Image (cartoon, helix red, strand yellow):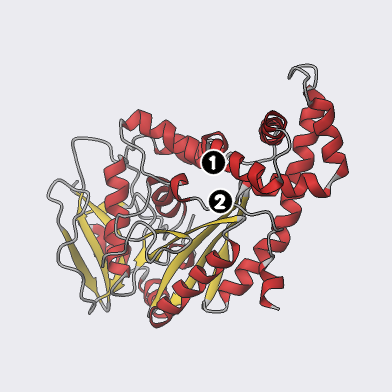
Amino acid sequence: MTATYVYGLVPADAELPDDLVGLGPSGSVSVVAHEGVAAVVGDVPTDRPIGTRDDLVAHESVVDRIAAVTTVLPMRFPAVIEDSSVVEELLAPHHETFARGLEALEGTVQYTLKARYDTDVLLQEILEEDAGARELQERIRGKDSDAAYYDRVKLGELIVKALEKRREVDATDIVERIGEVAEAVSTTTPTEPEEVVNAAFLVRRDAAEEFENEVEELGGDTHEWLRLRLLGPLAPYDFVPRGEE
Amino acid sequence: MTVATQTQGGGYVDRGGGGGSSGLADVVELILDKGLVIDVFVRVSLVGIELLTIDARVVVASVDTFLRFAEATNRLDLYGEDKGGKDLAELTQGVTEGAAKGKTAGALDAAVDKVEEFLGGNRDSEDDEDRREPVRRKPRPRTRERER
């Protein structure tokens, strides 16, 4: 079989940037259209497994550069299909889902905001407020790490709990504040104690600047204790219709 | 579209754009974890990906996490002792500058490191500690309070 790589789906009448570079040997990116929905496709390397850093970046780059100019439903990496099946197995049977998905996301882009505590600032704050933590810290001081093992675990646990408690308040604050400019929000549960927010915001393209300014202002207000990282504009990865997982 | 990879206009927000200007960790989180999945896609052989997705999802407050924070707390304290009567601002600032954030690299970063070793790639600069602002002594304002 000949395989085709699918980057995403766009309205059939969409104009794509003409210098997109795909992950295949030819690097070319083209579209296959069917009744108003088009698949953005390219060739696939046949002499090696895919999944290198360059492959990942190429996928993201194609999809996000399209997102910058038009609505796109991004595929999850990797999306490979038989050449001959693009219309009959992908576009035709799922036409309804794709068309509705594109319509729902029309005119929008995604921004992903990640916020982390400045750990040292927070640790200092927790120590100041929590006598129990200070006492444990006192007890650990000067002891070798084996002797103080349980106290160390206890102190760490106490700190982690305190961080999580603060996060509940701060995360809600941040998402509410920034979310005012967004159409929808999708939050991901933090995986680390110092992580405060990992959230995707669906933003109207014409409100993108306002959104960015809002985040910048938040950054200014919180820079003493929070590190913000903003990705975007991106394809609406977090807002695609639920496929079959 | 060209979105600057670094902070524009001297702001406090670290920016990563679309179109290939994000760090690898960001890319991985987006395109491996999110996006449309349809059952017609064929299985293809992949490099490193399985490993990475598994590692990236290792979460939880484990004993290791607790020890990491105990260590970080201890570090603050030791610094204070060495220097003697420094005030809080100097203390925190010193620690901020002195402490390599590498110790607190996340699970995802670790996973990316691992895969990059495997792929022989270079790390993107996901962190940029150089631009960190010195902290000040006043308690951090909550965004909510600030708004009122």
Q: Nearer the viewer, residue A196 or B79?
A: B79
**Residue A141: percent from left, percent from top:** 78, 25
Amino acid at the residue labelled 2? Pro
Residue found at x 57% / y 38%: B104
Q: Is residue B115 at least partly visible in the picture?
A: yes
Q: Chain of mark 2?
A: B
Compared with B133, A8 (above or below) is below
- What residue is disc 2 on? B134
Residue at the outermost bottom position: A206
- What residue is disc 1 on? B97
Q: Nearer the viewer, residue A24 or A192?
A: A192
Q: Chain of mark 1?
A: B
Q: Is residue A139 left or right of residue A111?
A: right
Compared with A164, B78 (above or below) is above
Residue found at x 50% / y 41%: B108
Marks counted in the figure total 2
